[in-house]
Image (spheres, coloured by chain):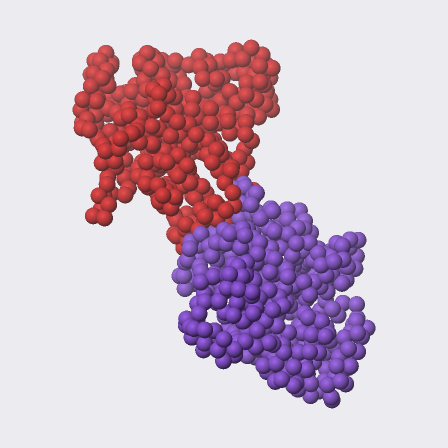
Chain colours: A red, B purple
Amino acid sequence: MNITNLTSNLKNVVNNESTSMTQFSWLHRGIVEIFPQPTDADSESLEKRLQTTNRPLRIKLGIDPTGSDIHLGHSIPVRKLRGFQDAGHTAVLIIGDFTARIGDPTGKSEVRRQLTEAEVAQNAQTYLDQVRPILDFDTPGRLEVRYNSEWLSGLDLGKVVELLSTMTVGQMLAKEGFAERYKKENPIFLHEFLYPLMQGYDSVAVEADVELGGTDQKFNLAVGRDLQRHFGQKPQFGLLLPILIGTDGVQKMSKSLGNYIGLSEHPAQKYQKLQGVPDNQLEQYFELLTDLPLDKLPENPRDRQTLLAWEVVRQYHGEQAANEAKEAAKTGGKEGALPEFSLAGVSQFPAKLAYILGASGLCKSTGEGRRKIQEGGVRLDGDRITDVDTTFQQPSELQGRVLQVGKNKFVRLVP
Amino acid sequence: MNITNLTSNLKNVVNNESTSMTQFSWLHRGIVEIFPQPTDADSESLEKRLQTTNRPLRIKLGIDPTGSDIHLGHSIPVRKLRGFQDAGHTAVLIIGDFTARIGDPTGKSEVRRQLTEAEVAQNAQTYLDQVRPILDFDTPGRLEVRYNSEWLSGLDLGKVVELLSTMTVGQMLAKEGFAERYKKENPIFLHEFLYPLMQGYDSVAVEADVELGGTDQKFNLAVGRDLQRHFGQKPQFGLLLPILIGTDGVQKMSKSLGNYIGLSEHPAQKYQKLQGVPDNQLEQYFELLTDLPLDKLPENPRDRQTLLAWEVVRQYHGEQAANEAKEAAKTGGKEGALPEFSLAGVSQFPAKLAYILGASGLCKSTGEGRRKIQEGGVRLDGDRITDVDTTFQQPSELQGRVLQVGKNKFVRLVP
């Protein structure tokens, strides 16, 4: 199959995808579980609620704004949210700013650093920018973005006591994570018990009909159900989604493991990384990251990889960028499509990042480079750099890496 | 020893008590423990803080306003508080109105019924009326009465998270009471973990130097220390007091066990009950309920009982009432000193309590009887009756009991 034919096929597949679906095939695609399932006692199913409710359902997805850059693994529930939007329902994105503002009061968790209001706002904005290609931001009534400080910051002690009173210590200690830590006598601080209840109370506050989450979120989604029942609401359905395996084909996609594809990466970078996804992961990637019908994928693994890379890049950057990335990968090999900057142009090392930004032409000057870093607009291999004094000792620390300012300015650093 | 000599001796003893004490004998009398004790690491003792602090210390006692009538057992920490007042310090009585207003949100505890603001206010007032003879209410700067809703009702979720973060699940489950329940798999609701922290936060709010409590309060007093340290305060000392054995000489004094002597009981009732305290409890009663020097008590058990009864009645009702109660007990036997009302004067049974109040002359009419019940001013054997429809089926339910309106009107109901 040559490239022209493949591209043409892709377009047909993309255009015809909806015709090959039954009414709820979008709902069931790539999910692990919907709970609760209908029982004799309660025969309602999510499908039934979707069909019989005389208003758009409210579909909750909680966002942790302690990080900012997200990857394809994070996109999975967001893509499912889009499915609900397209079926006429309301996506309710909840930015967990309240918890992020508190941080971890014990100071023991580096992950839960206390963030300022400005940091939270910036992270939330970066998140929204990154999911903009996935979600429907424009159709009225299809998207609500809520900050949970709206209802949590005003919660008084009486209400907190009420929340806590809905669960026993035994129930909480049965939660995955707590159980092992308690058994191993690793300290569990009391406030950790409050977090699932705060997340659950978010469901009450937004009157969620459905909450999306990874398989590790089942307990928290169930707490949301309990609290809704406690406060006289119809409990939400939980929809659990799988965890994406990273580009190494082995471990969960994660920034710290380096096996990720960031949503803010350059199309050519995305394309290149996607072409490297191992054969045995291709089907999962198609299922979770595209809407393409799985029974019509090319037989040839090489063609599959190309199709996957093209289709994912298309989603985030459009058809033209996908074609360019494909061309670049074909003609220029791995390094194509990105302008290059030779580190020989850096007069001396150690060198400050702000200076390199000016020297490379990404910024007009070292001063602008500093400002861009301070504003959070600078990334190295997709990781945001916020320390204006970031300094590199020698060129080898930077060779082959991609330096980025804002959404559209990239250079690959070469010797 | 005849009565005149005894009374005269009593007066001498009472007047001379202070001369027989060393500087801190009042502090150590009848206590179980002061903690922490000075160690190599921290050599401060409570005595040292008392001597070296250049201001009155703040001595905290927490009051649960869910009940109203209190007995001699409850008087023990209040008497100790008076000791601190007399040494120039400030008694800080904390009315736990916040918790009482919340009640038990699970609805499972009958003890923790949710009280209205008016009920809490009435209970607090009744409490203060009853301890008025013990505490110094008049010297400026010696008494502060605080309601903990002052600081707890405004506590936001961020602060609650901070409070919870100071303790681990393991530490909380080690607490007496929780440990057994957890082991037996009896449910412990999460909000129960918050109560010791709320009580501890009271110490922070009032900047307590010392907290008084029964031996069962050691954990809670220690939580107060931890929280004060967390919030940058010098931690309080805990002063633990014993639990009073009831008039049966066996079990802890308790209303439900019927082995109590209520502070609002008639002097003659108190006197009679105190005369019945078993010999083996007399020393503890003298130590905890009087300031009399223990090495100068009469040898004869009968004289000791008389002395105890006279001295306790004197504390609450004055010398004249104590003498009258003693005379009545001598001449009229057990039933003396109280006016009697014959239940033959009740025209028919079943009879409403409001009617009996009018018939007995305690109230002017059935209507006033109803009002007095509604106002919380009516007691039967010291127990407040608040249901205006309280009805008795036959005279035997009332015979021998003492009916009371306000502080000073009593009748004993006789056949």
Front-most of residues A195 and B327: B327
Residue B251 against residue A31 in the figure, above or below:
below
Could you say where residue B117 lies in the image, as x and y percent from the top left?
A: 54, 51
Q: Residue at x 18, y 24 (%)?
A: A20
Q: Quadrant of residue A213?
A: top left
Q: Residue at x 58, y 18 (%)?
A: A371
Could you say where residue A166 lies in the image, as x and y percent from the top left?
A: 41, 50
The N terminus of chain B sits in image quarter? bottom right
Residue A327 against residue A159 in the figure, above or below:
above
Front-most of residues B411 and A396: B411
Could you say where residue A397 lies in the image, as x and y percent from the top left?
A: 52, 24
Using residue A130 as the reference point, say whether residue B200 is left or right of it: right
Using residue B326 as the reference point, say whether residue B96 is left or right of it: left
Using residue A253 as the reference point, say whether residue B371 is left or right of it: right
Q: Residue at x 59, y 50 (%)?
A: B148
Q: Residue at x 56, y 13 (%)?
A: A358
